[in-house]
Image: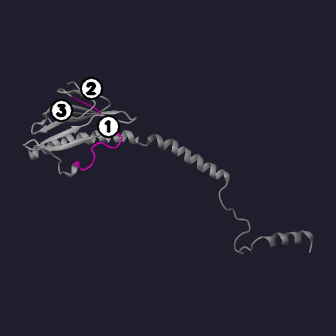
Amino acid sequence: MHAPQLAMKRQWALRLPMPKDRPLLTAHGFTLIELVVVLAILALVTLLVVPRLPDSQGTALKGSARALATTLRYLQDQVATTRQLYRLRLAPGTGEIRVTIVSPDGTESAPQDSFFSGPILREGVTIADVQTPRLGTVSSGVVTLDIGPAGLAEVATIHLRGGNSGQMTVVALSYGGRVTVGEGYLEANL
């Protein structure tokens, strides 16, 4: 045997045997250019999509403001159908809102309605302050709002704060049942 043929035979002897139907040189994996192109496409998609994703804190704040407005409307509807007095207790500086039914003898009890089973405000959302004509602006303690057959006893403006995402305002008008939600800290004309 010639030297080149012997060297080739030794080279083949060191390799594992391969099936005869597969070519000797097969490419496994991706080339560097293919990987760079895929990474560039992923970076472009990320740049386009991430700014359009909703802010979870802002969404929680808006959802909480809508939930509070819905609760106020629902309470007014419940009073109209059941002829019972409802009381809403708001704790400014916290996210605590409590609803109770006031019996004719003045005792309070929790409503059995499943509507009130969960929290009204989402996590991270607090009551900044509550404004009423009788109390002015209250930013600590507990504010009690009575809802009777004629509706809410007085106009109430409730300001909600959501971490770094700003503020929302819920205004409940007395004796009409109208509740509005506004973005930002809106002053009420009391």
Instruction: Using the image, tell me which numbered label, if any, was put on residue 126.
Output: 1
Q: Secondary structure at mark 3?
A: loop
Q: Which residue sits furthest top?
A: 189
User: Which three-letter amino acid code belongs to the residue tagged 3?
Assistant: Leu
Residue with the mark numbered 2? 187
- Sequence-wise first label, 1 or 2: 1
Give coordinates of residue 143: x percent, y percent: 21, 34
Cα separation, mark 1 vs mark 2, equals 18 Å
Label 1–label 2 contact, CB within 8 A: no
Q: Quadrant of the N terminus?
A: bottom right
Report the magenta residues as a range.
116-131
Give coordinates of residue 25: x percent, y percent: 73, 65
Query: Where is residue 104, by image quadrant?
Result: top left
Query: Where is residue 135, by image quadrant?
Result: top left
Query: Where 37 falls versus 4 (above or below)?
Result: above
Residue at x-position 20% and y-position 43%: 99
Residue with the mark numbered 3? 173
In-front residue for pair 63/112? 112
User: Which three-letter amino acid code belongs to the residue tagged 1?
Assistant: Thr
Q: Nearer the viewer, mark 1 or mark 3?
A: 1
